[in-house]
Amino acid sequence: MMKSMEQMDTVLTGETSGNRLRLLSYNIQVGINSIFPHHYLTKSWKHLFPARRRFETLDNIARLLREHDIVGLQELDAGSHRTNYVDLTEYLADKANYPFWYHQLNRNLGRIAQHGNGLLSRYHPTEITEHRLPGVVPGRGALLVRYGHGEQSLVVIMLHLALSPRARMRQLGYIAELVGQYRHVIVMGDLNCAPSSAEMAMLFRTTHLREPLEELLTFPSWRPERNIDHILVSSELRVVQCSVLNHAHSDHLPIAMEVELPQDVVLA
């Protein structure tokens, strides 16, 4: 699923554009432009059937993605009837000119839907691992993407958690064990819970991930009042800036972050 693996072999160090990395996490709701409450009803058919304007929305999203180095996307389709059998991760990678992309299929409903998470990257991952998250209802997963090697590597974990607090507690417990295996870690995605929740408190207590310094509201996009989309970083990564982008192409707003990497971290 990676496009042109030999096309880029880039090292990010202090000698390039600084040692900063631009990140974005976005739940794109399969390209359904739900920007008002009534759209959940009037556009619900787009979860099952093709829609011409879906790709207009995806083109708008692609223009937004271009400014970032690593993008984690949630609620994509790998190519089913509703998307005219187009893999949306590949489509966005092509439109936004990302040399590397990967789709994690978490819920396979055949021709009806191919639901999952997506990675877009300007840097060549050295390792990609899919993880199935625990839960009574299957279909949730995490994508672990590693850049570089050994202690100097950077690990990015992309995920979309369950709606149930009990399931999220189990899922974040699983993620905490993964995080503990690496020194430099970024966790990002739609976590469906706020930093003040019991499950997030457990994550911060048992890992070296830092709690956000401010509340960033991302849902719903037309009147954000919930802080459920996150980019979390380990203690040695310095957050330069973090913000919610006012681009309503989904029922979520995207969250963007710029981080400064330690000098010994190399992306290759």
Image (cartoon, rainbow, N blue to C red):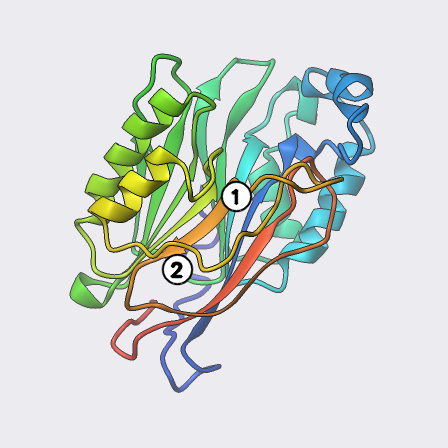
Which of the 4 image quarters holds residue 266?
A: bottom left
Q: Is residue 111 left or right of residue 117?
A: right
Who is closer to the viewer here, 175 or 150? 175
- Amino acid type at circle 2 is His
Who is closer to the viewer here, 208 or 16? 208
Who is closer to the viewer here, 19 or 235? 235
Classify mark 2: helix, strand or loop.
loop
The x and y percentages for residue 109 are: 52, 13
On screen, residue 23 above or below 194: below
The x and y percentages for residue 224 are: 67, 42
Residue name at image x 35 percent, y 72 percent:
261
Q: Is residue 29 left or right of residue 25?
A: right
Which of the 4 image quarters holds residue 63?
A: bottom right
Classed neighbour count for the residue bearing mark 1: other residues with Cα under 10 Å, few (<14), some (14–19), many (≥20): many
Task: Decide if residue 17 is in sight here.
Answer: yes
Residue highlighted by disc 2: 124
Residue name at image x 43 percent, y 21 percent:
164
The x and y percentages for residue 202 are: 27, 39
Q: Which mark is residue 195?
A: none
On screen, residue 266 above or below 213: below
State the separation of the CA atoms marked 1 and 2: 25 Å
The x and y percentages for residue 146 are: 30, 54
Classed neighbour count for the residue bearing mark 2: other residues with Cα under 10 Å, few (<14), some (14–19), many (≥20): many
- Amino acid type at circle 1 is Asp
**Which quadrant of the rendered structure holds the C terminus?**
bottom left
Comparing marks 1 and 2, which lies closer to the viewer?
Answer: 1
Task: Decide if residue 132 is in sight here.
Answer: no
**Which quadrant of the rendered structure holds the N terminus?**
top left
Residue name at image x 48 percent, y 36 percent:
117
Residue name at image x 17 percent, y 62 percent:
150
Residue highlighted by disc 1: 229
Classify mark 1: helix, strand or loop.
strand
